[in-house]
Image: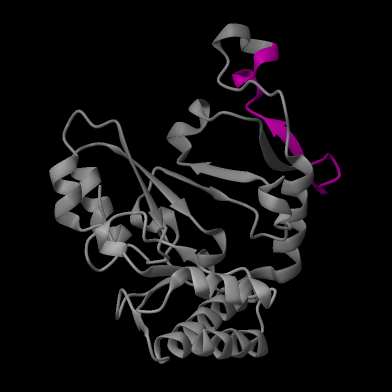
Amino acid sequence: MNVSENGAIEKDAVEGSVDDDTAAVIIQSPNFFGVVEDMQALSAVIKSRNSLFVAVVNPLSLGIFMPPGEYKADIAVGEGQVLGSTMSAGGATFGFMSVKKALEWKMPGRIVGQTTDKNGNRGFVLTLQSREQHIRREKATSNICTSASLNALAGCVFLSGWGNDGFKNLAEINLSKARYAFNKIKSLEGFKSKFENKVFFNEFVIETSKNIKKIQNVLLKNSILGPLNLSGINENFKNCLLFCVTEQRTKAEIDRLTEILAEA
């Protein structure tokens, strides 16, 4: 399904693409452009066709946006790198998957459950092991060869350290810094918003009348990894740039970015 002119998937597009033979629909929000999709409306269409709904989410965004369970997603998946892992040129990090209880026997991977020992102390154990290869052999839904447990452990420590309120604050910081950068950049001569009045998280699209290659080269000379050139996607994104601003960036860094863009 293609996104509309406002950067999101329209309800009509889903209605025209999903029928009674559709097994599942996968939708990412925030999407590639950073735009937050109307997941409730899209979910209603998908559910009317009795299809499974898989939500791909940025876990940090869930500190302020509706969680997948509330808009009736059957499965939620995502990238865990944002939960305390380094960039490391794309790895190693970890992914996460959560499903409705009715689907847990179909999940791949080992499942760790919380329990208590004989003294009432909290503990964790591997649960539903009858799904796994050492019991079900060739019928197993879980076949473990490699593991990202260390990265997942780091994510757990990260979440525990921030806590519920801290996690929400972190999401708000992400939102506010990206919005600050967005407002600064679109106010520059030669730059404007591609998707005006849309809610976004981390990423946002800016259209420019300037030379994109020159912009990227100037930024790189100033030790800034520039925005992604979207011109190759299709004609609708000619002269468009995808910026990303997270909690890692400071106000001073954002101001410096806009100063360089103004002179590029």
- The answer to which quarter of the image holds residue 142 is top right
- In-front residue for pair 189/19: 189
**Percent x, y for residue 115?**
72, 42
Q: Residue furthest right?
A: 119
Q: Residue at x 44, y 88 (%)?
A: 183
Q: Residue at x 57, y 91 (%)?
A: 259
**Percent x, y for residue 260?**
57, 86
**Percent x, y for residue 203?**
47, 69
Q: Which residue lies furthest to the top in this view?
A: 138
Residue 106 in sight in this render: yes
Query: Does residue 131 show up magenta in the picture?
Result: yes
What span is in magenta?
Answer: 116-134
73 w.r.t. 134: above or below: below
Residue 6 is left or right of residue 202, and the answer is left
- In-front residue for pair 70/226: 226
- In-front residue for pair 117/16: 16
- The answer to which quarter of the image holds residue 159 is bottom right
Q: Which residue is drawn at 25% across and 54% down?
A: 42
Query: Does residue 259 show up magenta in the picture?
Result: no
Count of residue discs? 0
Residue 246 in sight in this render: no
Asked which colour scheme the image uses, the reply is one colour
- The answer to which quarter of the image holds residue 85 is bottom right
- In-front residue for pair 57/125: 57
